[in-house]
Amino acid sequence: MKRRLNIDALSQTTFDLLIIGGGITGAGILQEATARGYRCLLVEKGDFASGTSSRSAKLVHGGMRYMKYGKLGMVKESLEERNHLLKTYPRLVKPLPFLFPVYDSKLKYRLGVALYHFLDRENMLPDYTNLEPDEVIREFPAARQDGLLGGFLYYDAVTNDARLCSEVIHTTLEQSASVALNYCEVKNSIRHGNRMEVHCIDHIEQRAIHFLCHCIVNASGVWTDEVLRKLASGTAGVTAPSKGVHIVLSQKRFPARTAVIFPSYAGDSRMMYAVPWENGSVIIGTTDTEFFGKPNHCAANEDDVNYVLHSIREFAPSLGITENDILYVYAGLRPLFRENKISSERARDYSIWWSHDRLLNIFGGKLTSFRSMAEALADELQQKFAPSSQPADVLHEQLHVTDDHEKIHPDFEATTGEARYFIRKQQCYHLDDLLTRRLSLTYVLNGCTEKKEIITKVAELMKEECGWTWEEYEQEINNYCEMLENASPIKKLE
């Protein structure tokens, strides 16, 4: 497997900024710093968005639940950022109605929804609507009727989190001399006067490489402590992430026309979200449990799945949802600071700090607020470092993809033309990159009787585009099928 960029040439360049982390936070920083004149190199040890930024609830929202903790400023900022994303990325961030059935204290929730709408000063989306019990049932007939007091219909937004992250990165690259590399892991750094030499491992060509920069930004999310141990030894741990698990069902089994909010029925006051998503899927979650392991080993367990299933069964018993209806399960980590509070009470604040005069860190926050976080970091950066005045040529080859509207499968909208575009333009090296984070087919393949044919067809296309050997082709199929099987509580790959 070969790189599409000449990494050796990049190692001869001194970048203003080397950004560690190809999730949405790093993507936003790449975008903002490049716009301010910095020449940036972003490196990510896996695929772009392969960590937290592809394992979210797929929502772009203000975070209504944080109002009860007094975080009104954070909610207001998130609503402003939601509106910006709706305008800037209309293909990837779309308005979505939310049905909120109420089973206790309707006045309390009405005040909350009204305040949430009041904080949204731009009022891009429709006002909330008060619903009587029969109107709630009309919207979602399967909702539990016992104790139903009514509800509300309000608006937020839904996104494809991984595609949004990749779009931010690659749109920036197309317009600048900045560079982004996935599958490039930072190992350590050495200082040479006013420059840092950052040593990495290229996991595509399996070799060591180094890059030069004036400043490093650690935007590695839940891997922040790990990166700090490599680059600023002796730094105390700052992270204490929590785990959130989602399950994926077919909309045929959970027929929601809107997003639906409902109680967890676990005695913990949590609310669950069911979000209609792509390819006829519904994403439902989430859990919130303390996580003490290594971020690379975050996975759902039986208790996580049963927690979500119990909530669905209690809220919509007539649907008869069982484990056999689950198409896919994924687990992600929230980047939370270490505090003397349980995870559910720790809000999504973020912080920016210097470990030394060449290493700037950012940690915390949420997907919706990635742009404002990037702006705050760039403001801090500019107090110490000005952009280089050296002219730089755009390094990225302009590739043309011939129009090809052939569908990969009749049940899905994804086409072979899209697949070729993502391989050539957005650095897809593995089947998982394409099927999960670009085409979003992984979420629903277990519900398709022809999943083997789809996997084989996409693998053949990638073999052609990436120049895989037969051994690489077979290994990619085996790796992907194993991942897909492990991501479902039922063994559906015979």
Image (tube, rainbow, N blue to C red):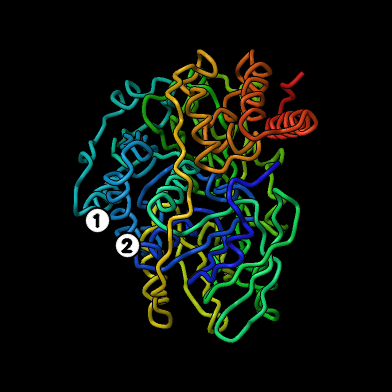
Task: Tell me if label 2 and label 1 are in contact, CB under 8 Å.
Answer: yes
| Residue 259 drawn above or below residue 494 | below
Q: Give the alpha-carbon distance from disc 2 to disc 1, as whole Å.
A: 8 Å
Q: Residue furthest right?
A: 471
* Residue 313 appears anywhere in the view: no
Q: Residue at x 52, y 80 (%)?
A: 354
* Residue beneath the point at 42% across and 74% down: 388
Q: Position of residue 432 (x, y in %)?
A: 64, 36
| Quadrant of the rendered image containing residue 241 | bottom right
Q: Nearer the viewer, residue 28 or 104?
A: 28
Q: Amino acid at mark 2?
A: Leu
Q: In front: 255, or 271?
A: 255
Q: Residue 344 in the image: state x and y as whole percent.
A: 53, 57
Quadrant position of residue 359: bottom right
The answer to whether residue 141 is left or right of residue 449 is left
Left or right of residue 118, residue 134 in this image: right
Residue 269 point in image, percent of width and height: 49, 48
Relative height, residue 196 to residue 457 (above, below): below
Determine which of the numbered discs, if any, sits on residue 119 in the image.
1
Q: Amino acid at mark 1?
A: Leu
Label 2 crowd (10 A; few <14 / some 14-19 / many >=20): some
SS at mark 2 in the image: helix
Label 2 sits on residue? 72
What element does badge 1 sit on? Answer: helix
Quarter occupied by the N terminus: top right
Image coordinates of residue 129 in percent, x first then y, are 23, 36
**Residue 383 to residue 124: above or below:** below
Q: Can the viewer see residue 459 in this picture?
A: yes
Query: Which residue is situated farthest in the bottom direction here?
Result: 193
Pointer 2 or 1: first along the chain: 2
In front here: 101 or 124?
124
Name above or below for residue 365 compared with residue 482.
below
